């Protein structure tokens, strides 16, 4: 596809002088001045883990895979996991979307992580803090606990992680089927965290007494033990033998202890657990029927996972709610009541029962997947606001008068439950605890505000540690601010995937790795919103030759003796990495 505004006749004139222009100091005419002003890409602002995506794409486009991996690791210790299971809100906000199609950010992220792990690369993250004297306990080795431990270790703390199950990983290891997330990926990324000195204590069941004793041994505690308690449907018969919960079933699939299933199984719910249970049941030989009380478009499960489930033979009954389960000679009799849509709220159907319209299903087994809650009420953060409690974006911090603190993170505190939100929560808690232990409670909110990515809520560890990109302008670059004349239409990378017939033969990973050539090509599509990628347009277009190359990190500077402030460089910057400001306003260099 050729962009309509680009043709061989539309190349602008570039003025040249055959003699020296040194005596013509046009800088004296200037009342505005351009400056290099890197900004925030909308994808980064939308990423719950706060990754510097524009920079990652730039590095991949240059074939600098290790540097791209290290850039991701500044903000996210689990790129191999997120590249597979994150619902990639970054892509929904990608500026390339209104132009042609969003960048396949998660596919590139997975490529980078897989490449680094395949070649056994060791990251050099550079800007870690020196060793701290305090020890921190992390309870739960799911995504939020792993992230908290990783960032606390990078901040110099001795970190002990206590996990109830036999190995770290939480939901990543036990709650996501291997065809979406192979356990080897979890193992490799946990090993990366372990290599920072984090100590894992598995098989440690959490009790109230254990929790109460932790502040005697640790200066701070991060609680990230997730939501594993079941939500009841509140219907007669849900305790009958043959009625099981979705998450324990997925756990047994992971551990390989499930016998083959047969006949019809009903799965109640519309979230990712319901879809995962249904797809596992197909692979184990059953005929699953997923029952959801709203419409397909209202399901909280990822759309592409629902599509694949239906393709694999899962049946979906929309607008039916369970009312009763009773014994039946062939297993269980599930009675359903039909629902109708009465209105919509925030794009989601509000439903009510259509009285008298019922149907039944005879099922060998029924799986309940209605969502989860904290296993014990004492695991929840305090609901009452006191002077000790600090409610942050994805963390609740309780600062005690004796100088210790407990941070509640992950599912226990975050509004949105996703792997990327859990990682963001672990990072926010690590920064909050560091600020609390160093500077006290009152410094926490302000310090966190200074490392939010764009308007937040995600935070950047690189900004906190004052790394290379810490001075990014929080302004989020819009599509209208991109100079699209410099870009050609090009289709998005298509994720290679096993065929349906291949998928159904087992639990092997469905999405396949892309080649380096395809990853580079996809990264080259990125506008690099708000990031100088050294394209040199500013220098080429300056009519006064005022842009000079140098050996600084930026690679160039503006000679103000000759810059008359016309702003051509700012307009011709394809990615809004420059600004025109009033003379001598200071600000960013
Ligand atoms: S963690 Fe999720 S939102 Fe962030 S870059 Fe990766 S896929 Fe996108
Ligand atoms: S074009 Fe690139 S930098 Fe811009 S929003 Fe999309 S992925 Fe991010």
Image (cartoon, rainbow, N blue to C red):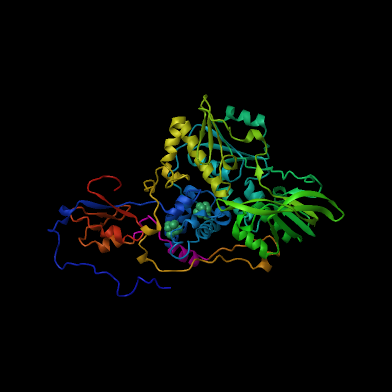
Q: Position of residue 59 (x, y in %)?
A: 43, 58
Q: Nearer the viewer, residue 296 or 214?
A: 296
Using the image as rendered, state which of residue 237 and residue 131 is in the foreground. 237
Quarter of the image where the N terminus is located: bottom left
Q: Is residue 363 left or right of residue 299?
A: right
Give the residues in magenta.
515-534
Residue at point 42%, 53% (across, down): 41
Tell which of 452 and 520 is nearer to you.
Answer: 452
From the viewer's perspective, tell me whether residue 565 is left or right of residue 141.
Answer: left
- Tell whether position 86 is magenta: no
Tell me which residue sits at (35%, 66%) in the image.
485
Rendering coords of residue 238 (x, y %): 77, 46
| Residue 120 position by quadrant | bottom right
* 518 lies above or below 145: below
Res 51 seen here: no
- Is 519 a magenta residue? yes
Q: Position of residue 264 (x, y in %)?
A: 78, 59
Vertical comparison of 321 with 441: above or below: below
Residue 297 in the image, given as x and y percentages of width and height? 60, 57
């Amino acid at each position: 596809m050729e962009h309509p505004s680009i043709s061989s006749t539309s190349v602008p004139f570039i003025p040249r002088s055959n003699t020296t222009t040194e005596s013509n100091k046009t800088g004296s005419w200037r009342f505005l001045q351009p400056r290099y002003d890197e900004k925030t890409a909308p994808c980064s602002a939308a990423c719950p883990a706060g990754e510097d995506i524009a920079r990652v794409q730039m590095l991949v486009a240059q074939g600098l895979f290790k540097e791209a991996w290290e850039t991701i690791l500044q903000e996210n210790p689990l790129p191999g996991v997120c590249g597979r299971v994150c619902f990639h809100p970054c892509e929904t906000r990608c500026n390339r979307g209104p132009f042609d199609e969003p960048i396949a950010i998660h596919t590139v992220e997975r490529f980078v992580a897989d490449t680094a792990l395949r070649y056994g690369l060791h990251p050099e993250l550079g800007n870690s803090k020196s060793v701290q004297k305090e020890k921190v306990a992390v309870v739960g080795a799911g995504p939020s606990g792993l992230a908290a431990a990783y960032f606390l270790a990078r901040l110099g703390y001795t970190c002990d992680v206590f996990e109830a199950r036999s190995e770290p990983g939480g939901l990543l290891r036990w709650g996501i089927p291997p065809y979406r997330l192979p356990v080897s990926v979890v193992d490799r990324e946990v090993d990366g965290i372990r290599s920072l000195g984090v100590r894992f204590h598995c098989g440690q069941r959490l009790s109230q007494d254990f929790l109460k004793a932790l502040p005697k041994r640790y200066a701070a505690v991060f609680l990230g033990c997730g939501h594993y308690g079941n939500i009841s449907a509140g219907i007669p018969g849900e305790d009958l033998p043959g009625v099981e919960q979705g998450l324990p079933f997925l756990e047994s699939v992971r551990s390989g202890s499930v016998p083959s299933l047969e006949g019809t199984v009903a799965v109640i719910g519309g979230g990712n657990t319901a879809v995962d249970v249904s797809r596992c049941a197909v692979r184990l030989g059953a005929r699953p029927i997923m029952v959801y009380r709203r419409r397909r478009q209202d399901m909280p499960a990822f759309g592409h996972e629902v599509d694949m489930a239906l393709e694999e033979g899962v049946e979906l009954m929309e607008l039916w709610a369970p009312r009763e389960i009773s014994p039946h000679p062939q297993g269980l009799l599930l009675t359903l009541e039909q629902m109708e849509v009465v209105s919509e709220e925030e794009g989601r159907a509000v439903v009510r029962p259509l009285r008298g319209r019922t149907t039944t299903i005879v099922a060998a087994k029924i799986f309940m997947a209605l969502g989860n809650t904290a296993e014990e009420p004492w695991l929840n953060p305090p609901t009452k606001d006191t002077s000790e409690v600090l409610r942050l974006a994805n963390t609740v911090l309780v600062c005690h008068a004796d100088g210790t603190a407990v941070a509640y993170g992950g599912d226990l505190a975050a509004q949105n439950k996703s792997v990327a939100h859990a990682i963001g929560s672990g990072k926010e808690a690590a920064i909050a605890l560091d600020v609390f232990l160093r500077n006290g409670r009152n410094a926490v909110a302000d310090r966190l505000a200074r490392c939010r990515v764009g308007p937040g809520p995600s935070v950047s560890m690189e900004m906190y540690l004052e790394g290379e990109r810490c001075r990014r302008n929080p302004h989020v670059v819009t599509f209208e601010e991109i100079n699209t004349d410099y870009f050609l239409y090009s289709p998005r990378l298509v994720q290679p995937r096993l065929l349906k017939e291949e998928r159904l033969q087992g639990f092997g990973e469905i999405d396949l790795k892309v080649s380096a050539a395809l990853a580079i090509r996809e990264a080259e599509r990125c506008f690099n919103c708000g990031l100088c990628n050294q394209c040199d347009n500013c220098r080429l277009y300056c009519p006064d030759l005022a842009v000079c190359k140098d050996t600084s990190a930026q690679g160039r500077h503006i000679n103000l003796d000759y810059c008359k402030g016309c702003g051509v460089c700012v307009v011709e910057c394809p990615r809004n990495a420059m600004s025109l400001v009033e003379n001598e306003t200071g600000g960013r260099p």
